[in-house]
Image (cartoon, rainbow, N blue to C red):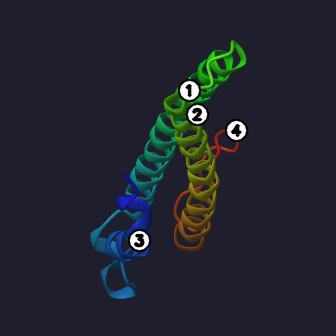
Amino acid sequence: MRQLDDKIIYMLNAILPTESFKGQSDPTAKCKDLYEQIQTGHKSRELAITRCLNASKEKVNQLKAERDNGNDSPQLLKALRKEQNTLRLLQSELNIEEVVKDHTVETYYQKCRGFYKPPTDIEI
């Protein structure tokens, strides 16, 4: 899912022309297209992680309610610990996603700032 973020420098180098090839391509259109790809990828990943995070929170709350109702079975406690661990991992993943997003945005702006300026009301 992060393939675009992992290869951002390569992609920017591939789409932006050197001085000798400047007239042969349209860097503004290419930067705009890349911006849209980045934005779409970030939104879809954040949405997917958030959906999983919400599902995990619901599961933890359900398991806690069962435990509070007097069910102290080892299977329930094990499932609760496992789901709490999953919840922590998903929260960490959301934080990691923010760091990756910041790095991608910074790299994009360094290379494309002279060719395309994204709308100010929308953040990558």
Cα distance in 3D space between marks 4 and 1: 52 Å
State the residue at coordinates (47%, 43%). Answer: 45
Q: Picture coordinates of residue 54 (x, y %)? A: 58, 27
State the residue at coordinates (62%, 18%). Answer: 71
Query: Mark 3 against mark 1, which lies toward the viewer?
Result: 1
The three-letter amino acid code for the residue at tag 2 is Leu
Is label 2 in a helix, a strand or a loop? helix
Lower sequence index among marks 4 and 2: 2
Residue closer to the observer: 70 or 3: 70
CB contact under 8 Å: marks 4 and 2: no
Cα distance in 3D space between marks 1 and 2: 6 Å
Lower sequence index among marks 4 and 1: 1
Is label 1 in a helix, a strand or a loop? loop
Lower sequence index among marks 3 and 4: 3
Query: Mark 1 against mark 2, which lies toward the viewer?
Result: 1
Query: Mark 4 against mark 1, which lies toward the viewer?
Result: 1
Residues packed near mark 4 inside 10 Å, few (<14), some (14 to 19) or many (20 plus): few
The three-letter amino acid code for the residue at tag 1 is Ser
Can you identify the residue that label 4 sits on? Answer: 121
Q: Picture coordinates of residue 42 (x, y %)? A: 50, 46
Can you identify the residue that label 1 sits on? Answer: 73
Is 102 rendered above or below residue 90? below
The three-letter amino acid code for the residue at tag 3 is Leu
Cα distance in 3D space between marks 4 and 2: 46 Å
Please tell me the numbered disc located at residue 77.
2
Please tell me the numbered disc located at residue 12.
3
